[in-house]
Amino acid sequence: MKTKLLIIFGGASSEHEVSCMSAASVRRHLDETKYEIYQAGITKEGNWFLTDSPVSDIEDGSWIHNPKNRRAVLTADASIRGILILRENGTYETLPIDVVFPVLHGKYGEDGTIQGLLDLARIPYVGAGTTSSAACMDKAITKLIVGRTGVEQADFYLTDCHTFCADPEGTAKFAEVYFKGKYPLFVKPANAGSSVGISKAKDFQGLLEGIRLAADEDSKILIEEMIVGREIEVAVLGNLEPKASPAGEILSAGEFYDYESKYINTESKTQVLDDVSEEIQERLHQASLEVYKAMGCRGLARVDFFLEQTGRVVFNEVNTLPGFTSISMYPKLWEAAGLSYRELLDTLIGLAMETEG
Ligand SMILES: Nc1ncnc2c1ncn2[C@@H]1O[C@H](COP(=O)(O)OP(=O)(O)O)[C@@H](O)[C@H]1O
Ligand SMILES: [Mg+2]
């Protein structure tokens, strides 16, 4: 019997479009002899539809206009373990689901919210659980947890919207003093993604503006020393005995890997890192597994680092649902390790079902 798999995509986050592209790619590579595939799209407003739209329409967002889309909701009722499809006349039908792949990035997708709903529904799902998703999404919490491991990270200063609004200049001054007047600094909202709200402050004025910008995205704000190094990413896969992939490198077209460099400027490139010593590869490998375990990850995560010229490995952040398009780093790194995209999906779904109950 085929496994009933529900892909959830889109979502009410700033990464809606990226999620549609990732989901299309996942859909394309799934083995249809093994899975009975259902697709639930969430609009930017947060409406749920069960859709039979072709992959290309999911990719470009036009699935939203499919007249055959049906309103559907994922119910938290554990006796149903599935979705309710709403009929025009106000009644509904139930569709049981064996496993969910939430191909959602950022807010409401990667932050523990949908994971919590799936936990209540008792439906196994691909990726990190509720607590781990929420902790990895929040850069401030991540910093505090990783700070208890042996893995190095940029020095940081935490502040919040309330403190800043009460005394903007004073708050920025405190941060400046903390870093002993050294610039540039990176200012980030604790919860965001795709570089939204992140800026590089080159002086006091920039710091002030950066905090204001970050405060628009989240009430918690993180200020970090700047790390000068290559941007490296490692793909981790597994539950209790995770494995790390070979490392990959980001070659950003912009001054840093901001939204424009990630999704607009096609000059940005990713490639497998093949010009460093085995010792450095090993260091990246160990650090990524240590972070993965400390953060309580499950299924998959991409762990991001800076590699300084001295060979020092500095942790940056962890993404529990990294980009999944065919050119995204996560599947690309596993392909480099000999695991095809299709095998990767089978592994992820297997890992999800392992955690059932
Ligand atoms: N401390 C830092 N030093 C140097 N560059 C940084 C630092 N923090 C972030 N960056 C740059 O900003 C980009 C986005 O920051 P990141 O923390 O990865 O947020 P996001 O979750 O939006 O990807 C990074 O890929 C990197 O180019
Ligand atoms: Mg990042």
Image (cartoon, helix red, strand yellow):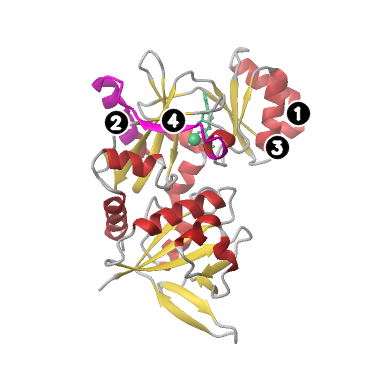
Q: Is residue 270 magenta?
A: yes
Residue in the picture at 57% in, 42% down? 192
Residue 323 at x, y percent in the picture: 45, 45
Q: CA distance from mark 2 to mark 1?
A: 43 Å
Q: Which residue is mark 1?
A: 167
Q: CA distance from mark 3 to mark 1?
A: 9 Å
Quadrant of res 284? top left
Q: Amino acid at mark 2?
A: His
Q: CA distance from mark 2 to mark 4?
A: 17 Å
Q: CA distance from mark 2 to mark 3?
A: 39 Å
Quadrant of res 102? bottom left
Q: Closer to the N terminus: mark 2 or mark 1?
A: 1
Q: Which residue is mark 4?
A: 250
Q: Which residue is mark 3?
A: 162
Q: Are marks 3 and 4 in contact (CB under 8 Å)?
A: no
Q: Amino acid at mark 3?
A: His
In the rendered picture of this protein, how many numbered marks are placed on residues? 4
